[in-house]
């Protein structure tokens, strides 16, 4: 979908980014009411009517890997096992995990 074509119909669970760089997920779509409810990455929730939705330039994006955006008080220890590194120190990319022929 080209950016100029408009975002189409809101899909619940889909992530988008607007021209100002704000990322959000569609959390509800009420077709009869003509409203899409979105939650921005920082946790703010907003409703967009379909006229505004159709005029907004949006880029579909993947869901962020960092899920902590809506939470103000997440500490490093809240993320799980922080005593061990998340990856071995000698890991420098998925390329090393592929079987390579000499």
Image (cartoon, helix red, strand yellow):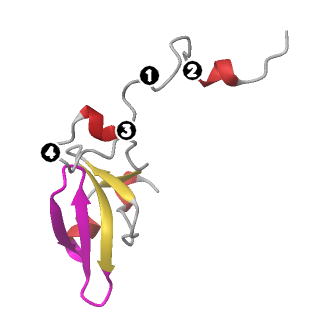
Q: Please name the residue that numbered disc 4 is placed on.
A: 72
- Which tag, 1 or 4, sits closer to the chain's start? 4
Q: Quadrant of the C terminus?
A: top right
* Residue 81 drawn at (x, y percent): 40, 33
Cα–Cα gap, marks 3 and 2:
22 Å
Depth-wise, is mark 2 or mark 1 nearer the camera? 1
* Residue 24 drawn at (x, y percent): 28, 55
* Residue 16 drawn at (x, y percent): 34, 54
Question: Is label 3 in a helix, a strand or a loop?
Answer: loop
- Which tag, 3 or 1, sits closer to the chain's start? 3
Q: As drawn, is 55 to the left or to the right of 31?
A: left
Depth-wise, is mark 3 or mark 4 nearer the camera? 3
Q: Please name the residue that numbered disc 2 is placed on.
A: 93
The numbered disc on residue 85 is: 1
Decide: few, some or many residues near mark 3? Use Cα within 10 Å; few <14, some 14-19, many ≥20. Answer: few
- Which tag, 4 or 2, sits closer to the chain's start? 4
Decide: few, some or many residues near mark 1? Use Cα within 10 Å; few <14, some 14-19, many ≥20. Answer: few
The numbered disc on residue 24 is: none
Cα–Cα gap, marks 3 and 1:
11 Å
The numbered disc on residue 80 is: 3
Q: Is residue 48 magenta?
A: yes
């Amino acid at each position: 979908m080209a950016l100029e074509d408009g975002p189409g119909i809101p899909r619940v669970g889909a992530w988008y980014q607007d021209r100002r760089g704000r990322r959000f997920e569609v959390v509800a779509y009420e077709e009869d009411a003509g409203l899409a409810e979105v939650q921005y990455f920082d946790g703010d929730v907003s409703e967009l009517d379909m006229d505004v939705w159709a005029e907004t330039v949006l880029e579909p994006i993947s869901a962020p890997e960092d899920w902590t955006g809506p939470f103000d008080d997440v500490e490093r220890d809240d993320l799980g096992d922080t005593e061990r590194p998340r990856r071995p120190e000698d890991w420098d990319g998925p390329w090393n995990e592929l079987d390579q022929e000499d």
